[in-house]
Image: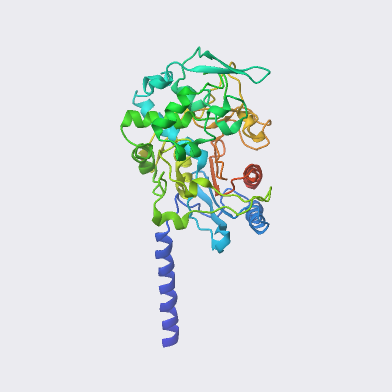
């Protein structure tokens, strides 16, 4: 009898310990009533098999997948390795550099100033950064000779947020104009102070007349520096006060603390497609300013809360970041018929998309290689992170991985097919 009683007490102790452990690792959103709710069991198995195969075949080191359906977390799983070279397993609290998924957060931060009447979208950016007052547009003739003409239009705040500003990434082309620009946001922040960066951009010829063509570039980096001008704080300080603290994103920062570096996910040492060595430079670099275009770190749990806040119309757990009409405005297409739409130039799956304020927005179904619905919005990161929201499906998808090569685009298309294929209706 005593043995039975002791066994019962031990079982009770183990259950209570498990309950305490579960509470200490609280999920980022309420869990669905059943695991994978809203998705078929067959579809969930396909998702697990996909990640297992990718890890086993050295197509990725590991990943964390967070999927919310109808406001509840249906999938929240780590796969593979945080660092395959040391066989360190992936965990849900792993930290990833967001690269361009930083842009969505910086845009939301800017829209909080917009709602206060401090950042009108039609205002020229020279109101805050006078270096941009008299810009020149570059023109390259058939012989490759560069000339410039005065810009007809000022660069506006809206031009920054929808990438119609002409401030291109140097790494996205080989024209004489591209050579004036840093390769990308993270390299710029590693090499220049914010003042040096602004002066360099303002002295460069624009690739396009402002307001006439979508072209991926430094718009959100400049936007973040305007936010700093308005607030008198760093961009990290702005976003902490206006976004991260309200949403509940304790792991999201620009400057990663040393104590958190053991949680930083690492890429495979070799690019799976080219066989060449690969790394994420910013992991070992000290940036000189908080670049709104690329430089933040976060977790899948933090970012799925951010996506749910947007899907909710700007609030989460009773705390409001933006008004519902502002979110609707942000996630509408801002490219009119007179603006050249080059969004699909970033990747083939962007056909059928326009662009809002910081996010790509689907305007037509059936052109993109990716499934989804009109009105879904998204943006991804150059190091392998993926994010999209589908309001029709009440769906938020965040996949954090580290794949700095071109294979990240293959992962995006395959994950999209797996998620939509698994939906039950």
Where is residue 189 shown, x and y percent of the image?
Answer: 45, 38
Instruction: Pick the residue in front: 282 or 235.
Output: 282
Which quarter of the rendering shows the N terminus?
Answer: bottom left
What's the residue at 60%, 32% (across, down)? 172
In the figure, is residue 200 to the left or right of 235? right
Residue 25 image-quadrant placement:
bottom left
Where is residue 268 shown, x and y percent of the image?
Answer: 60, 54
What's the residue at 35%, 32% (across, down)? 228
What's the residue at 53%, 40% (across, down)? 394
In the figure, is residue 175 to the left or right of 246? right
Which quarter of the rendering shows the C terminus?
Answer: top right
Where is residue 59 shown, x and y percent of the image?
Answer: 65, 52
Visible residue check, residue 215: no
- Disc tally is 0
Residue 80 image-quadrant placement:
bottom right
- Farthest residue to the left: give it: 232
Instruction: Pick the residue in front: 113 or 216.
Output: 216
Where is residue 339 shown, x and y percent of the image?
Answer: 58, 19
Visible residue check, residue 203: yes
In the figure, is residue 143 to the left or right of 401? right
Residue 83 image-quadrant placement:
bottom right
Residue 409 position (above or below residue 353)? below
The figure's colour scheme reads: rainbow
């Amino acid at each position: 009898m005593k043995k039975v009683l002791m066994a019962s007490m031990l079982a009770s102790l183990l259950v209570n310990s498990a309950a305490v452990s579960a509470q200490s690792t609280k999920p980022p959103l309420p869990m669905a009533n059943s695991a994978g709710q809203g998705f078929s069991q067959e579809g969930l198995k396909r998702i697990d098999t996909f990640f297992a195969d990718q890890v086993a075949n050295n197509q990725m080191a590991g990943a964390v997948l967070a999927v919310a359906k109808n406001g509840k977390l249906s999938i929240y799983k780590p796969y593979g390795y945080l660092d395959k070279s040391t066989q360190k397993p992936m965990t849900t609290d792993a930290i990833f550099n967001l690269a361009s998924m930083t842009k969505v957060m910086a845009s939301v931060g800017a829209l909080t100033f917009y709602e206060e009447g401090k950042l009108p979208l039609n205002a020229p950016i020279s109101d805050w950064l006078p270096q941009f007052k008299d810009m020149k547009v570059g023109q390259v003739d058939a012989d490759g000779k560069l000339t410039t003409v005065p810009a007809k239009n000022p660069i506006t705040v809206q031009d920054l947020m929808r990438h119609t500003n002409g401030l291109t990434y140097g790494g996205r082309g080989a024209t004489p104009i591209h050579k004036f620009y840093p390769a990308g946001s993270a390299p710029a922040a590693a090499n220049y102070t914010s003042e040096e960066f602004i002066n360099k951009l303002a002295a460069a010829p624009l690739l396009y007349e402002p307001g006439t063509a979508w072209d991926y570039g430094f718009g959100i980096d400049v936007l973040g520096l305007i936010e700093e001008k308005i607030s008198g704080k760093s961009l990290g300080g702005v976003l902490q006060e206006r976004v991260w603290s309200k949403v509940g994103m304790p792991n999201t920062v620009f400057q990663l603390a040393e104590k958190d570096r053991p949680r930083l996910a690492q890429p495979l040492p070799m690019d799976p497609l080219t066989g060449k060595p690969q790394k994420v430079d910013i992991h070992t670099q000290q940036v000189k300013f908080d670049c709104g275009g690329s430089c933040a770190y976060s977790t899948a749990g933090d970012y799925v809360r951010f996506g749910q806040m947007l899907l909710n119309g700007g609030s989460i757990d009773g705390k409001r970041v933006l008004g519902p009409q502002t979110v609707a405005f942000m996630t509408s297409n801002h490219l009119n018929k007179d603006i050249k739409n080059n969004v699909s130039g970033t990747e083939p799956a962007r056909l059928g998309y326009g662009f809002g304020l910081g996010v790509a927005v689907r305007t037509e179904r059936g052109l993109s290689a990716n499934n989804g619905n009109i009105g879904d919005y998204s943006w991804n990161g150059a190091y392998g992170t993926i994010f999209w929201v589908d309001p029709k499906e009440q769906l938020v998808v965040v996949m954090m991985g580290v794949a700095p090569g071109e294979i990240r685009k293959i992962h995006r298309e395959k994950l999209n097919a797996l998620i939509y294929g698994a939906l039950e209706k």
